[in-house]
Amino acid sequence: MDSVTKVQPPTKLNEPMPVVQTWNLGKVYRTGFWLNQKLRSLKDCSLSVYQGETFGLLGPNGAGKTTLLKILLGIIRPTSGRGVLLGQPIGRREVKQRVGYLPENAYYYDYLTAWELLEFAAGLFQLPKHIQKKRIPYLLDLVGLAHKTARKKQLKKYSKGMMQRVGMAQALINDPEVIFFDEPMSGLDPLGRYQVREIVLSLKAQGKTIFFNSHILTDVEQICDRIALLARGELLCVGSLENILGRSDVYQVIVKGGTQKDLEPWIEGIREIEHSWHGQLTGDPQEFMVALSKMDAQLLSLNKARASLEEYFIEQLRERGLTTSQ
Ligand SMILES: Nc1ncnc2c1ncn2[C@@H]1O[C@H](COP(=O)(O)OP(=O)(O)OP(=O)(O)O)[C@@H](O)[C@H]1O
Ligand SMILES: [Mg+2]
């Protein structure tokens, strides 16, 4: 398998490098007492994630998100297909030094303090002490944990939000180039979600590649460059939010009064429906309002043309009859 799993170099200069690439990945779990039942949790999954991208893998419970992430990290083996992570076939030990991972249900020795946990994680990567001394305080600042708390308080006394932030610091101890977060916002209150989102955005600003699983669609909408939608193990779509949902600055308008000739420069695809003008606004909404007052016309409605990710997500699942979780 290794001999054929090579990343193609970019064909043009400045073309982004794929950090993750998969071809027809599939996973069948054997279940039941005699392991004689088969459960297919991933099917023909092909995708690419590029350097510096924040990529969101969405899907309902049981869609196969964690399975895909674990395959990419080499924690479980695929049943079919192949993949490449940072230029190496997935599962290679040497790549692990360059990768960070926050598991879905992380378990830590809860009698440790955050500081001790980070020292432990640093030890696993054999980080020299002088680097640990700089890296640990830096990460605590990044995830917003007070140094005093991190030194004194045992993890068992942490709130869920604090645990999630410690988990993120632990995932970043080796200064990874690519970071996998499995449901980093799940179970957090709005403040906790905001804090995690800010951490992800600051990693993105540092040029890290971020791959995360989520079903909190508003967060995904705010931070992801591209998304993939997975349901029952199959990828339904992959693309940028703009490609999938359309541009976020496009408005549908309905206007009463005025003439078609006056409105045409402002409204694309203008058509008259029940004595009002309908179409897509081409200019700035504020300037349009001023222009309308001069035309003796009245704005009846102005709505964003783009559907929310949530509407899109539900629509896609409904179209395929997948609105029940596995
Ligand atoms: N070790 C396993 N053995 C057998 N079946 C498994 C195993 N792990 C996962 N599955 C099954 O594979 C399917 C996909 O599970 P997975 O955990 O990847 O979904 P998910 O999208 O991460 O779900 P969630 O949003 O709930 O975390 C599910 O039907 C699950 O029951
Ligand atoms: Mg999962």
Image: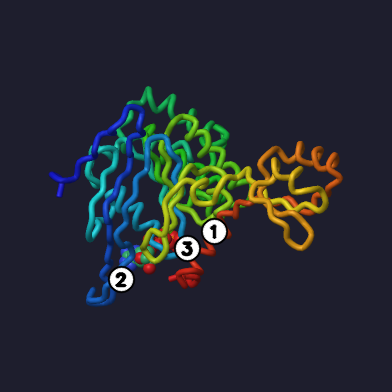
The CA distance from mark 2 to mark 3 is 17 Å
Q: Residues within 10 Å of mark 1 (few under 14, many from 20)?
A: some
- Residue at the image position 73 percent from the left and 61 percent from the top: 273
228 up-or-down from 128: above or below: below
The image quadrant in which ligand 1 is located: bottom left
Residue picked out by circle 2? 39
Kindly identify the amino acid type of the residue bearing the numbered disc 1. Tyr
The CA distance from mark 1 to mark 3 is 13 Å
The CA distance from mark 1 to mark 2 is 28 Å
Q: Residues within 10 Å of mark 2 (few under 14, many from 20)?
A: few
Residue picked out by circle 3? 60
**Residue 210 figure quarter:** top left
Q: Is residue 275 visible?
A: yes
Q: Position of residue 235 (x, y in %)?
A: 38, 58
Kindly identify the amino acid type of the residue bearing the numbered disc 3. Pro
Q: What color scheme is it?
A: rainbow
Which residue is farthest top? 130
Which of the image's four quarters has the C terminus?
bottom left
Residue picked out by circle 1? 312
94 up-or-down from 163: above or below: above
